[in-house]
Amino acid sequence: MSQIKGKNTKPEILVRKFLFGKGYRFRIHSTGLPGKPDIVLTKYKIVIFVNGCFWHGHEGCKYFVIPKTRTDWWTAKIYKNRERDSENYDKLVQNGWRIIRIFECDLKKDKIEKTLNELIANIH
């Protein structure tokens, strides 16, 4: 568990490189905002969360499977992650921020182009 990164993950870096290449400038892991968003576009008042499907309980996703051992513990952990996400999103919206969530499965080879094009469309 200690080897699992919470910052600068491959999906997150992929989105950052794409945005930078398109001319967007941003902050990363802003500690002054609820939930420490992965990417903050202050000019557009948008925060982007790049979430792992397993850790954030992405429903209907093949990458979200509860482990067969310690099932109760994992279920409770993922439920708490979802609750914390929801609370942070509510706080951000109350402060006037727009939220974009990208799950790691949306950045796989078959979906990445569509996902990144939708991201650009959502920013404007």
Image (cartoon, rainbow, N blue to C red):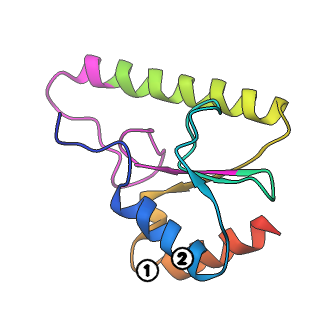
Residue type at mark 1?
A: Asp
Identity of the residue drawn at 28% across and 35% down: 66
Against 118, is 10 above or below? Answer: above
- Residue 7 falls left or right of residue 74: right
The verdict on residue 55 being magenta is yes
Left or right? Give the position of 30 relative to 106.
right
Q: Is residue 45 positioned above or below 87 on the image? A: below
Q: Which residues are magenta?
A: 47-74
Q: Is residue 44 left or right of residue 7?
A: right
Measuring 49% from the left and 76% from the top, which residue is drawn there? 112
How far across and down, in percent of the image, does residue 55 sit? Answer: 37, 39
Locate the N terminus by quadrant. top left
Q: Which mark is residue 18?
A: 2
Q: Residue at x 14, y 27 (%)?
A: 69
Residue 119 location in percent, x, y? 66, 69
The residue singled out by tag 1 in the image is 110
What residue is drawn where x is 16% and y is 32%?
A: 68
Count residues near mark 2 (Cα–Cα under 10 Å), then give few for <14, some for 14-19, many for 20+. Answer: some
Task: Quarter of the image for the C terminus: give it.
Answer: bottom right
**11 above or below 121?**
above
Name the one closer to the observer, 9 or 74.
9
